[in-house]
Image (cartoon, grey):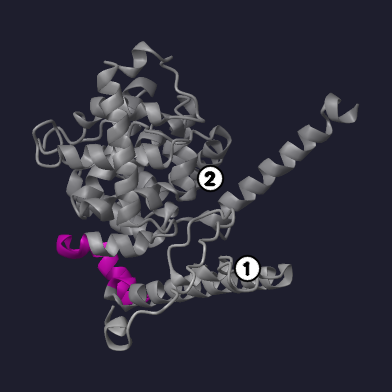
Amino acid sequence: QEYESRVGPATEPPPHPQPTRRKNLEFEPLSTTALILEDRPAYLPAKSEEESQRHRQEYSEMVAGAKRREMKEAQKKKLSHPYMRNTRRARELWWQGVPPSVRGKVWSLAIGNELNITPELYEIFLSRAKEKWRSFSETSSVNENEDCGVSLADRESSLDLIKLDISRTFPSLYIFQKGGPYHDILHSVLGAYTCYRPDVGYVQGMSFIAAVLILNLEEADAFIAFANLLNKPCQMAFFRVDHDLMLKYFAAFEVFFEENLPKLFQHFQNNSLTPDFYLIDWIFTLYSKSLPLDVACRVWDVFCRDGEEALFRTGLGILRLYQDVLLQMDFIHSAQFLSRLPENTPAHALFSCIANTQMISNNRRWNQVFSALMKDGLKETDKSSSNSPALRS
C-alpha cells in the first residue's frame, strides 16, 4: 500500500502463485532448517530427484550437527557444576550428601535427559492423561467395561490405579494425600508418564520415586528426571518385569553377597531366602519407602554418582548393618524384617557399612560380573535354540 501511494496502482497485479501441496513428510517442518525439504513454489523450476536426495542428506547432517552441539553444550554445562567434576573432592561431597538446596539441580544433571523431553512434551502427555481421566469419570470406572488384567502393549488404562497408590505414598508427611499441597502434582506426573510410556504403564513403587523428585524439583523438571531415570537399564528391567534380566541382577547381587557376608549368605541359603523377597521392593522404590526419607536421599546421591551398582551396594550395606539380628531369625521373620526396616535406621552407621562393602569379586567389578552373567545367559539361549526340535526339523 505504501508503494502504491507513491507510484500509483499497477495496471495488472502480478499473478499470485498457487500454493503447492506439501510432500508426504513424516513431520511438519517447525523451523527454517526443515524448509530445505519442501517443494519449490509452482512458479519456480521443480526439484530433480537428485536435488531432493541431496537436500534430504543436507538436512540430516544439519540435524545431526545441531544434536552434537546441543549434547556438547549440555556436557559443558554439566561439567561446570562442582558436583559433576570427576575429582576426589567432588566424590567426597557426593558421599557426604548433596545439600538439599542444590540436590534437585545436581540430580537432574547426573540423570541427564537422553530422551530429550521438554516441558512442552510433558504438557502434551499431561493433557492426554487428563482426557483419559475425564473419560474414566464419565464411564464411572474403566474396570466396568474392560478386563482388570492390563496387557503390556497398552497400559494407559492404569491411570485409575494411580489414585489408589498415591494415598500410600509417604503417608506420615500428609503432603501427597488428597488435599495435600503435592497431591495434584504427583497425580499429574504419574498420569503423564503412563501416557508417555503405555508399554510400561504404572507400577507400584513409581509413586515413591516421583514423590522424591517432586520434593526437589519443579513439576516439569521432575517429570523429565522421572522418565529418564526409569529409562535406565536396571529400572526398566524391573518395571517391565523382565524376569530373565531380573534374575541376572539377583545372581550378580548374590556373587557380592557371598563375597562380603559369607555367614549371612549361607544362613539365607539354608532358609531359602532369595534376593527377590527383599530386593524387588528396594529397587522399585530406590529405598525411598524402606529407609527414612533423609537417608534415602543420601542413597540417591550415591546412586546418581555411581549408577546401578550403588543400589546393590546399599542393599549389602543394609544386610551388613543388621547381620547380627538376621542371623537369629528364620525365613518368615527375616523376610518381614527386610520388608519393613526399622524407622530409625541411622545414616552414619548405614553408610559406614556401605563403605565397608567391597564391590570386587575375583578382581571383577559389578559391571564385569553382570556382563559375564549376561553372556552366559545368551550362550544358554543359543544352546537351547540349537537343540530345539522345531529348529532341527
| Residue 63 in view in this figure | yes
Q: Quadrant of the N terminus?
A: bottom left
Which mark, by number, is residue 252? 2
Q: CA distance from mark 1 to mark 2?
A: 47 Å
Q: Which residues are magenta?
A: 83-103
* Secondary structure type for disc 1: helix
Q: Compare marks 1 and 2 and give the one earlier in the sequence.
A: 1
* Secondary structure type for disc 2: helix
Residue 144: image quadrant is top left
How far across and down, in percent of the image, does residue 305 sit? Answer: 36, 62
Residue under the point 23% across and 59% down = 104
Residue under the point 20% across and 54% down = 216
Q: Sort mark 2 into few (<14), some (14-19) or many (20+) by Cα contacts within 10 Å.
A: many
> Which residue reaches farthest top?
144
Predominant SS along the magenta part? helix
Q: Report the front residue among 283 and 160.
A: 160
Q: How many marks?
A: 2
Please state which amino acid type lies under the numbered disc 2.
Ala
Q: Report the front residue among 75 and 355.
A: 75
Magenta stretch holds residue 233 = no
Relative to 129, is 17 above or below?
below
Query: From the viewer's perspective, is the residue at label 1 or at label 2 nearer?
Result: 1
| Residue 325 in view in this figure | no
Q: Is 70 on the left or on the right of 162, as rendered? A: right
Identify the residue under disc 1: 56
Please state which amino acid type lies under the numbered disc 1.
Arg
Relative to 288, is 40 above or below?
below
Residue under the point 33% across and 88% down = 7
> Which residue reaches farthest right?
393
> Which residue reaches farthest front?
11
